[in-house]
């Protein structure tokens, strides 16, 4: 009897072990994959929060420009690009801004805040919206599907599917690289995830599905600033634009050509190149048999600019070196060739006659701290509407050789005169003879 009981216990133990082992080795239940929203789903769910923005010329009641915006709060705050409403900033007496909703209803809006450096603006319209989109500045994996909404060429609200390709590296003003086809009229629209979270604001395109977004954190910062103070800035929005550009140039030009700078060799000269990661540099050479001289150039420029108006860009730094040499020209012939390059115009600056004064120049021959002789030409012009800002072109030409010469040019836009003088001096002092 005891033997049978032991056998029963052992059998039950093996059965229990088998049951436990089987339960541990069995495959877990397969859960259904979450439904992936299609482009159609995203459009149906979130398009009602996107509006068309029209800038109207008051005298004729005709549209001067269009763009896109989206509701970003329950209080009726609308995010868009600064460049979409820039005409109203420069001529508030001539223009007004209207919002066209998804069903075609029209309402007037007013500007609450601008960020000219990052090309953003916050508007407010009435009545308040039934819903809004949430700005969500958080990291995401490269290749994430995104959806951009906007009004391309006034053809109606459109959705474009694309992919997230990260923040642009080594750029002065951070932007999201969006692989999708943005078109004129979509500026200011949202680019969002399938869940409707806005990761960026449509701002620019370079064609071939290379597009750029202002990161959501910049839009969120401006929106939060607006919530704290909704009264217009002192002196109006155009004065605020000037203050923002002034503060920005003080920040990014600080220490340029002052701290250790990479150098490039052109013939007997050692010259500055790529003073910061946000510069792009290129080189070229002209050596043709039919020409009695050779030219080697090295060109560096910031990779971005600030849109001030349709007639004016700012925030640009460019410098270029040109080395001319000859083995065929007489000294007098080379002098004439060289002098023409030294006296070249100031085409590197950007702005119409309504936006800036005429250039005023001063020329002098100087000797650098290293004992080298340079002809220095500094030309500057003042912004008409934005106090304390200038465009400037500084040109340094080496002296003393009959068959070779270097012309090096520094062009600045939207900088203080203090920075014009400081950068020109540091730039000239960075030019060296000998390797």
Image: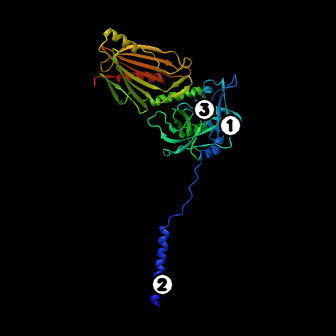
Q: Can you see residue 360?
A: yes
Q: Can you see residue 415?
A: no
Q: Which mark is residue 8?
A: 2
- In this view, the residue farthest toward the front is 290
Q: Earlier in the sequence, mark 3 or mark 2?
A: 2
Tell me how far mark 3 sits from mark 2, CA to CA. Answer: 82 Å
Q: Is residue 359 left or right of residue 58?
A: left
Q: Earlier in the sequence, mark 1 or mark 2?
A: 2
Q: Secondary structure at mark 3?
A: loop
Q: Residue 99: where, in percent of width, then height? A: 67, 34
Q: Is residue 269 left or right of residue 349?
A: left
Marks 1 and 2 close (CB-CB < 8 Å): no
Viewer-nearest residue: 149 or 382: 149
Tell me how far mark 1 sits from mark 2, CA to CA. Answer: 79 Å
Quadrant in which the C terminus is drawn: top left
Q: Tell how many labels.
A: 3
Marks 3 and 1 close (CB-CB < 8 Å): no
Residue of label 1: 101
Res 233 quadrant in image:
top right
Res 329 quadrant in image:
top left
- In this view, the residue farthest toward the bottom is 1
- In this view, the residue farthest toward the left is 435
């Amino acid at each position: 009897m005891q033997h049978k009981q032991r056998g029963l216990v052992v059998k039950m133990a093996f059965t229990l072990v088998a049951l436990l082992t089987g339960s541990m080795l069995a495959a877990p239940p397969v859960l259904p994959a979450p439904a992936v929203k299609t482009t159609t789903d995203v459009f149906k769910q979130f398009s009602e929060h996107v509006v068309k923005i029209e800038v109207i010329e008051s005298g004729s009641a005709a549209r001067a420009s269009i763009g896109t915006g989206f509701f970003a709060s329950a209080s009726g705050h609308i995010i868009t690009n600064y460049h979409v409403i820039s005409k109203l900033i420069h001529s508030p007496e001539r223009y007004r801004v209207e919002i066209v909703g998804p069903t075609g209803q029209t309402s007037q809006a007013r500007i609450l805040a601008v960020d000219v450096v990052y090309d953003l603006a916050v508007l407010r319209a009435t009545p308040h919206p039934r819903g809004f989109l949430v700005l969500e500045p958080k990291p995401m994996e490269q290749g994430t599907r995104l959806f951009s909404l906007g009004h391309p060429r006034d053809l109606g609200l459109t959705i474009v599917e694309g992919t997230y390709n990260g923040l642009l590296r080594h750029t002065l003003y951070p932007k999201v690289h969006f692989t999708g086809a943005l078109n004129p009229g979509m500026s200011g629209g949202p680019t969002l995830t399938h869940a409707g979270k806005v990761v960026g604001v449509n701002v620019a395109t370079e064609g071939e599905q290379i597009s750029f977004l202002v990161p959501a954190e910049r839009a969120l910062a401006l929106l939060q600033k607006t919530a704290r103070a909704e009264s217009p800035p002192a002196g109006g929005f155009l004065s605020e634009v000037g203050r923002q550009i002034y503060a920005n140039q003080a920040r990014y030009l600080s220490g340029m050509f002052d701290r250790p700078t990479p150098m490039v060799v052109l013939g007997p000269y050692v010259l500055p190149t790529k003073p910061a990661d946000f510069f792009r540099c290129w080189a070229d050479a002209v050596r043709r048999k039919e020409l009695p001289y050779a030219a080697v150039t090295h060109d560096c420029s910031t990779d971005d600019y600030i849109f001030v108006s349709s007639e004016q860009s700012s925030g640009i730094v460019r410098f270029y070196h040109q080395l001319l040499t000859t083995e065929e020209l007489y000294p007098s012939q080379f002098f004439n060739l060289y002098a023409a390059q030294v006296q070249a115009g100031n085409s590197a600056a950007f702005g119409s006659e309504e936006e800036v004064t005429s250039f005023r120049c001063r020329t002098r021959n100087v000797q650098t701290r290293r004992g080298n002789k340079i002809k220095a030409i500094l030309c500057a012009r003042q912004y008409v509407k934005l106090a304390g800002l200038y465009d400037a072109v500084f040109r340094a030409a080496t002296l003393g050789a009959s068959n070779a010469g270097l012309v090096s040019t520094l062009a600045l836009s939207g900088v203080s005169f203090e920075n014009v003088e400081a950068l020109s001096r540091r730039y000239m002092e960075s030019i060296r003879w000998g390797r």
